[in-house]
Image (cartoon, helix red, strand yellow):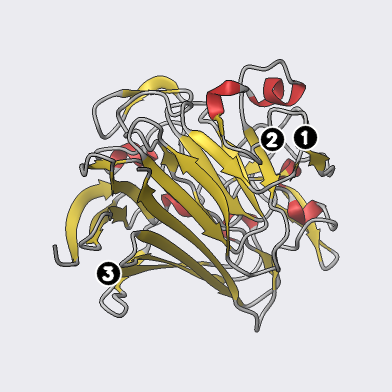
Amino acid sequence: MPTAITCEPFGSALGQPVERWTLDNGYGIAISALTLGATLQQVRAVDRFGERGNVTLGFATAEEYVTGVPPFFGVVAGRYANRIRDGRFTLDGREVQLPRNDGPNHLHGGPEGFDRRTWRAEDATENGQPAIRLSLTSEDGDQGYPGRLDASVTYLLTTDDALEVRYEATTDAPTVVNLTQHAYWNLEGENRGSALGQLLQVRASRYLPVDETLIPTGDLAPVAGTPFDFTAPHALEARIRVGHPQLAIAGGYDHTLVFDGGEPGEIAPVIFLEGPVSGRMLRIETTEPGVQLYSGNFLDGRRIGIGGTLYRAGDGVCLETHHFPDSPNHPEFPSTVLRPGERWTSTTRYRFSVVP
C-alpha cells in the first residue's frame, strides 16, 4: 500500500473552518489530524489479526470538541500543559497572572488555550514519509502569558510504524512553555469500553504527589510499595481502586511519573502499553523528563465518541509526556522558561507493533 496524505473540510468550530488531514504510512498505521487544536482525531493501528482500528478517543464533528467542559481529546495542550497553582508565577521579578479555569488553578493554557485555536497546516512530507506541520502564533498577553510565542507541531509517520511528534517554539520575550499531546489511548479499540485492562510499564521509580487541587507538593516520592509502581508491567485496573490517599484525591490516576536516567533532551524508550486482547503494543520514546498518567477520571458517560459509544471514566488513558506541572513555582523542577534567541524543542515517538 503506498503512502498517502489528504486534506478535506471538516466543518467549523468557533466561527472558523476546520480541516482534517489524513496520513497513511502504507504499512500499519494512519492518523487523522484537525487544524482545530492540532488535534489527533484518530490513530489507526493494526491488531494481531491484521485489522486496523482506531485506538484514540475523539469526536465525529469539529463542533463537539469545543462544546461543554473540554475533555481535551487528542489536542495539543498549551501554552502550558497541565496545572499552574493559582494561575500565578514570577518570572524575572515580574508576577504573571493567568486565568483560573480549574478551580483555583490554571489548566492547559487557560479557557482559550491552544486546543481552541485554528492552526495553520502544510504538507511536510519527509523522505517519502507522510507528515504535516501545524503552526500557531500566540501573541504577547495571550491568556496572560508574556511574550509572543511562535509554536509548531509536526506529525510524521515513519516506515517502521511510528508516529513521531516534534514540537518547536520561539519567543520574543521571556516566557514559559510546556506542550504535550493529550491523546486518550485504548489499544483494544476506541469503542471497546474500558481501557484499564491495558498493561502499562513505565521506567519511573519516582512520582509527584499532589495536594487537594492536584498541584504537585514538590516532593519526588518513590513509587515502590504504591499503586504508582509500573516499573514492571501491570494492568491499570489492578491497583486503581486501592485505598491510597493520592488515588482518592484524584479519583484515580492523575499524576506525573518521573523518568529514570537519560540525558536531558535525549530521546529514550520509557513507556510500554499493551492491549492484551488486540495484541497491540505501543512503545513511547521521548525527550521529556516525565509523563502525566491520567485514567480519564472526569469522563462521565455523557459524551458520544466517534465510534458511537458513550465515554465513561477509564475508557481511555492519557500518557502526556511533558515537563512537570507547576514548574514555574518550583525552581527545583526542570525549567520551562524560554528566552529570546532560544529554540524550545521536544520530540515524542509513538511506536506501534503487535504482540505475537
Q: Residues within 10 Å of mark 1 (few under 14, many from 20)?
A: few
Helix, strand or loop at label 3? It is loop
Q: Amino acid at mark 1?
A: Ala
Q: Residue at x 32, y 36 (%)?
A: 64
Which disc is residue 42 wearing? none
Task: Indicate which label's residue lies in the foreground, 2 or 3.
Answer: 2
Establish if 83 lies above or below 89. above
Left or right placement of residue 202 versus residue 39 in this view: right
Quarter containing the N terminus: bottom left
3 vs 1, front mark: 1
Distance of label 3 from label 1 (alpha carbons): 42 Å
Cα separation between marks 1 and 2:
6 Å
- SS assignment at label 1: loop
Whether residue 258 is visible = yes
Q: Residue furthest bottom?
A: 341
Mark 3: amino acid: Pro
The percent coordinates of residue 87 (x first, y second) are: 71, 46
Residue labelled with disc 1: 224
Residue 313: x and y in percent read 48, 23
Dot placed on the residue nearer the N-terminal end, 2 or 3: 3
Where 44 sits versus 323, above or below? above
The residue indicated by pointer 3 is: 130
Residue at figure coordinates x 55%, y 71% from the top left: 169
Q: Are marks 1 and 2 in contact (CB under 8 Å)?
A: yes
Q: Residue 107 falls in which quadrant of the image?
A: top right
Dot 2 amino acid type: Asp
Q: Is residue 37 visible?
A: no
Q: Nearer the viewer, residue 164 or 340?
A: 164
Q: Quadrant of residue 224?
A: top right
Q: Which residue position holds label 2?
A: 229
